[in-house]
Image: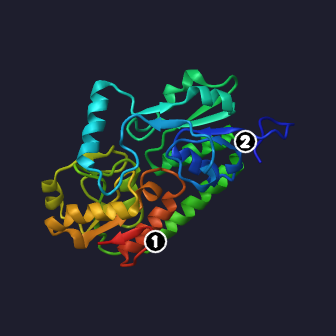
Amino acid sequence: MATRSAGTTSPVRIACLVPAATDIVAALGLGENLVGVSHECDHPLAAGLPVLTSASIAAAGLDADTDPAWVDAQVSAALEAGTALYRTDLALLRQLEPDVVIGQAICDVCAVPADTVAGHLPEGASLVALEATSLTGLEDDLAAVGHALGAGDAADRLVASLRSRITAAGAAAPEPAPSVLVLEWGDPPFVGGHWIPELVTRAGGTHVLGSADEPSRRATWGEIRHADPDIIIHAPCGYLLEVAVDEARRLFRPLGLDDRVWVADASRLFSRCTPVVAETVEALATIFAGGSPPGFVHL
């Protein structure tokens, strides 16, 4: 168990403002040290813990009746107006007295930006901002969190395990490499960015319409048709798998592309740059080799 300082057995108290942070803390074996989590933290260890964040607009809890174009319009309007998409319960954060608060500095649309709480931490608490947009960045995040929590050795072991699993997954890559498109939103279509093209490449595919470490971007259905990917991974942020399957059928069947589409459990496998990326690469490699991994549905 990580402790606050040398010579004491008092455990480090950890607050997470983003699901990726909770996933990393759990992967380091420190889930019992959690004292507060975000409203989107879905790790089993987060169940029943105080919730520190909330969404400012109705973009959470997506179901089969939610229009993705409406959600996109709501988010775009809020950003244009300078309206924060998320709130943090700063009074509760101070009340919980964490020693370490873990947030993110990658995407203001996805979660609370870490810098919004920087001046509101409990006395003596430190802030760690996750910044990974690549697998190398993930290793840096793991090292930073491990250092802050007194779990540097555990972080080193985790990094070594991730490297080994990802290398092994890509070792049997098919020839020629399949062309692959990952979409992280359906209407309008958004091409997966940051770490997602890298995951495709490491699994033995070639990502189209986006390159490693570039942010996600809007695309057109004309671009997608022209790119003519062999495989399309539909991984819309925030969707349950069964809801994403329903949406994929509506989007891709009229275009005659449904036979190429695999629908992913996006929140678990694509939306976070956490240790789960090893599982994602393994799953993609299985698809590229003609298999059917868990967490995916083929239309």
Q: Which residue is mark 1?
A: 294
Look at the picture and state if 88 lies above or below 242.
above
Report the mark closest to the observer, 2 or 1.
1
Percent coordinates x, y for residue 66 in the rendering? 29, 51
Residue 173 can be seen in this image: no
Q: Amino acid at mark 1?
A: Pro
In screen coordinates, is 236 left or right of 171?
left
Judge by depth and name the residue closer to the eye, 167 or 186. Answer: 186
Q: Give the residue drawn at x 48%, y 51%.
A: 135
In screen coordinates, is 71 left or right of 171?
left
In screen coordinates, is 183 left or right of 150?
left
Where disc 1 sits, the SS reads loop
Q: Give the residue drawn at x 47%, y 57%.
A: 268
Residue 166 can be seen in this image: yes
Label 2 to label 1, Cα distance in Å? 34 Å
Where disc 2 sits, the SS reads loop
Q: Amino acid at mark 2?
A: Gly
**Among the two numbered marks 2 and 1 on one chain, the one whose residue lies closer to the N terminus:** 2
Q: Which residue is mark 2?
A: 150
Q: Residues within 10 Å of mark 2 (few under 14, many from 20)?
A: some
Mark 2 in CB contact with mark 1 (< 8 angstroms): no
Percent coordinates x, y for residue 244 in the rendering? 33, 60
Percent coordinates x, y for residue 9 in the rendering? 84, 41
Question: In the orientation shown, which residue stands out farthest toward the front?
Answer: 65
Judge by depth and name the residue closer to the eye, 74 or 192. Answer: 74
Look at the picture and state if 73 lies above or below 68.
above
The image quadrant that residue 60 belongs to is top left
Percent coordinates x, y for residue 188 in the rendering? 22, 49
Look at the picture and state if 83 lies above or below 193.
above
